[in-house]
Image (cartoon, helix red, strand yellow):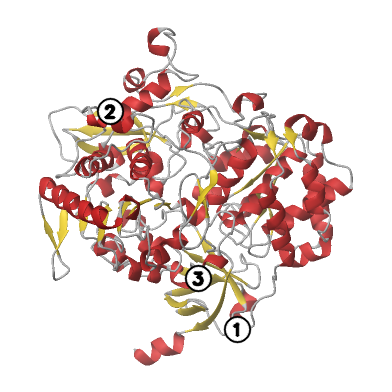
């Protein structure tokens, strides 16, 4: 940030953060088009004056000396040279057209990262480009951590993007499974001041129970019930069995709100509490009491996230979580499992455009069903290396670093090298972009127009906000949407998949993402209907407003039928995929491999965000180092001492971690390792902090994934460990 004095007075602008799903309100102080500071917006209706260190430090990302500021082209010796946008785009167009001529448009792939969730232009153009190409090679980071959510929402509620939110602000009992919102600030639940909102539950006499193999930062604040990694489906099935066997279910609510509820009895009939207890590592009596307490609470909400959604039964776990909320009468009620009030009804728009769905086609090599029009990341290497019609020959990676974040990351890197063309839209030379033929630098969220396209559908306090660019773009960078549109022009398509889009393109008309979203806003439930409802919203009105506009005090209730996209306007519970998954769960083995006797889970850290932000000095100061958490009993058994460097081996790979931290926060038999470390490439600080890539220990085998959704299994990895203390001492 620039703190240079100037005669020009500083000005404040209210914006929102684009780092994580919280989308906290910020105030940017600007002077001479330089960012002086970022601070929390005390008036923001959802975040209410809170923001974390990551968002407040983001000015350093925008001004980073390692940031790529002009298009780069790979040379024959592997180095990069700066080129003009015209040269880069023209050459990319020529190479794509040559690939299309031989292999067809279906050989072109696109990969979107999590950052696209705060970039409406990139989101629309990316999905539109895939639709126009008619390619099945649309990949999303969602298939690493959340695909099961999209699948369950499509089958139960009729849309991939319609996801209920826990009404924590009004609940009497919160069950938090595999989530650490005190650190993550929430996911699939944009609850302002998440930690404080949870503390409010206990302050008013309610309960919060945290289910996690680790006594996380969230669990430290509330009741903690340790669970074996990947035991979530077993726990939820056992809780439901207790609730139904003991007559605690709200049968009237099931009759009123759902269809096909008879499936629940079929699924639960073969479930044994003893078997579930062994699999989850929780005594039967504790499971029974937890189920009774949840069902008896005046209002309750069960919420689960990454720890629950990145295992081999992620889809079944999410389904059982929703059934738990529904069967106890907590769907669409205060303090329960509610639908949000987005200011742009993205769910309705995507449904109208027929952009939501499940199993409308299958992937070429592995036969995975599509989820929301996307294929799973685990399949990418095989789609590249397996010859035949539709073979993946070129890839555009937008706002993502799959060479580090994907399962079996090393195998993906090897496969990327076999592509005819790899294009990366990234602000850094990362582990992925360093392999690209072209690096096309995009703007950051401080430099482009935006609204929280994804998180507005999950806000605990409904609000509307749309901001223009906060600062001028640095160097010669361009918006992601512009980049994709320019590439699309050069291969003869419009990056849009609505009816008539390609015809409009032939007529020279290319509706911008901002125009399309404005139409969706103005014709939606909060819109001004082009002046017919003056109190309504429009893009112009929001851009002219300094800060967010509050739409309601909390989550709406009594709106189930209005929000459903199912034909009967009820929650459709009975689907064959859930019967198949329950059969698979009951037949699965939870015994630990004697060669790999420990179970590894990933850990999120307060000052990290997936695979980035390690290049910012303020976020890696002091003793910031990657540490493996291990229980004292396991440390003693395997000869690990505090601070030891440790080697971790799985059936799929091996890494070296700088330090071990011995702590009873871990459940015996379980280890926790922060993910997103182990950098290479041109971001110097990130490389210097060291660490190792968690995903070198994972696999992309098709049979290891969550089979209905193709979501990668990156939790509960079977590993063995050994201290490297003697090795390091000998080397010294």
The span from disc 2 to disc 1 (Cα, nearest Å) is: 61 Å
Closer to the chain start, of discs 2 and 1, is 2
Q: Nearer the viewer, residue 546 or 37?
A: 546
Can residue 343 be seen in this snapshot? Answer: yes
Q: Position of residue 519 (x, y in %)?
A: 38, 21
For the point 82% across and 48% down, which residue is it?
265
560, above or below 34, in the image = above
The span from disc 2 to disc 3 (Cα, nearest Å) is: 55 Å
Closer to the chain start, of discs 2 and 3, is 2
Can residue 678 be seen in this snapshot? Answer: no
In the image, taking residue 164 as reference, residue 141 lies left or right, namely: left
The residue identified by callout 2 is 504
Q: Position of residue 164 (x, y in %)?
A: 60, 37
Give the quadrant of the C terminus: bottom left
Q: Position of residue 154 (x, y in %)?
A: 58, 41
The span from disc 3 to disc 1 (Cα, nearest Å) is: 20 Å
The residue identified by callout 1 is 595
Q: Are marks 3 and 1 in contact (CB under 8 Å)?
A: no
Give the quadrant of the N terminus: top left
**Rendered image quadrant of residue 270:** bottom right
Determine the secondary structure under disc 2.
helix
445, above or below 683, in the image = above
């Amino acid at each position: 940030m620039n703190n240079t004095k100037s005669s020009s007075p500083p000005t404040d602008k209210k914006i929102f953060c684009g780092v994580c799903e919280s989308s906290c309100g910020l105030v940017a102080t600007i002077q001479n088009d330089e960012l002086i500071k970022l601070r929390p917006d005390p008036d923001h209706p959802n975040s209410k004056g809170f923001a974390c260190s990551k968002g407040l430090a983001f000015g350093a990302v925008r001004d980073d000396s390692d940031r790529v500021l002009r298009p780069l082209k790979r040379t024959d010796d592997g180095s990069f040279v700066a080129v003009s946008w015209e040269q880069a785009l023209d050459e990319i167009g020529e190479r794509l057209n040559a690939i299309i001529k031989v292999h067809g448009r279906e050989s072109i792939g696109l990969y979107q990262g999590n950052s696209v969730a705060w970039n409406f232009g990139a989101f629309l153009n990316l999905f539109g480009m895939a639709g126009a190409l008619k390619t099945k090679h649309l990949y999303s980071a969602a298939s690493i951590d959340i695909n099961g959510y999209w699948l369950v929402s499509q089958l139960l509620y009729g849309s991939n993007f319609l996801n209920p939110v826990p009404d924590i602000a009004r609940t009497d009992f919160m069950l938090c499974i595999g989530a650490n919102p005190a650190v993550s600030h929430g996911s699939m639940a944009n609850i302002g001041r998440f930690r404080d909102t949870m503390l409010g539950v206990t302050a008013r006499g309610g309960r919060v129970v945290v289910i996690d193999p680790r006594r996380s930062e969230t669990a430290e604040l509330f009741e903690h019930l340790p669970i074996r990694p990947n035991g979530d489906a077993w726990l939820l099935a056992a809780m439901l069995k207790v609730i139904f066997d003991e007559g605690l279910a709200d049968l009237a609510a099931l009759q009123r709100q759902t269809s096909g509820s008879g499936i629940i009895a079929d699924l639960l009939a073969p479930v044994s509490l003893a078997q579930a207890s062994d699999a989850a590592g929780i005594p039967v009596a504790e499971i029974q009491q937890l189920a009774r307490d949840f069902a008896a609470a005046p209002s309750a909400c069960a919420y689960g996230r990454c720890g629950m959604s990145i295992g081999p039964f992620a889809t079944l776990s999410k389904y059982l979580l929703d059934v738990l909320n529904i069967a106890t009468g907590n769907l669409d009620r205060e303090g329960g499992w509610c639908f949000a009030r987005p200011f742009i009804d993205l769910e309705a728009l995507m449904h109208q455009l027929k952009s939501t769905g499940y199993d409308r086609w299958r992937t070429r090599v592995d036969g995975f069903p599509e989820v929301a029009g996307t294929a799973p990341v685990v399949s990418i290497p095989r789609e590249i290396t397996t010859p035949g019609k539709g073979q993946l020959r070129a890839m555009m990676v937008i706002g993502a670093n799959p060479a580090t974040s994907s399962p079996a990351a090393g195998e993906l890197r090897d496969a990327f090298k076999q592509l005819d063309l790899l294009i990366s839209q990234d602000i850094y030379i990362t582990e992925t972009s360093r392999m690209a033929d072209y690096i096309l630098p995009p703007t950051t969220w401080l430099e482009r127009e935006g609204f929280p396209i994804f998180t507005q559908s999950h806000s605990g306090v409904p609000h509307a906000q749309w901001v223009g660019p906060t600062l001028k773009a640095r160097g010669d960078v361009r918006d992601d949407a512009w980049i994709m549109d320019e590439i699309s022009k050069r291969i003869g398509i419009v990056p849009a998949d609505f009816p008539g889009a390609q015809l409009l393109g032939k007529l020279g008309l290319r509706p911008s993402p901002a125009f399309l979203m404005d139409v969706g806003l103005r014709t939606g439930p909060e819109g001004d209907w082009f002046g017919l409802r003056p109190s309504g919203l429009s893009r112009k009105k929001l851009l002219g407003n300094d800060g967010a506009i509050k739409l309601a005090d909390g989550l709406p209730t009594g709106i189930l039928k209005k929000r459903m996209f199912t034909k009967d306007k009820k929650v459709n519970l009975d689907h064959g995929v859930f019967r198949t998954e329950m059969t698979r769960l009951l037949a699965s083995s939870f015994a630990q491999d004697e060669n790999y006797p420990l179970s590894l889970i990933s850990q999120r850290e307060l000052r990290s965000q997936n695979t980035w932000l390690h290049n910012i000095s303020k976020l890696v100061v002091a003793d910031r180092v990657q540490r493996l958490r291990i229980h004292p009993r396991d440390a003693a058994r395997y000869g690990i001492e505090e601070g030891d460097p440790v080697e971790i081996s799985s059936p799929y790979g091996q890494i070296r971690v700088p330090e071990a931290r011995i702590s009873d926060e871990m459940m015996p038999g379980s280890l926790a390792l922060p993910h997103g470390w182990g950098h290479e490439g041109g971001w110097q600080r990130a490389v210097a902090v060291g660490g190792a890539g968690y995903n070198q220990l994972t696999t992309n085998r098709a049979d290891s994934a969550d089979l209905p959704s193709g979501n990668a299994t990156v939790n509960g990895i079977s590993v063995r460990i050994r201290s490297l203390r003697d090795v390091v001492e000998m080397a010294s």
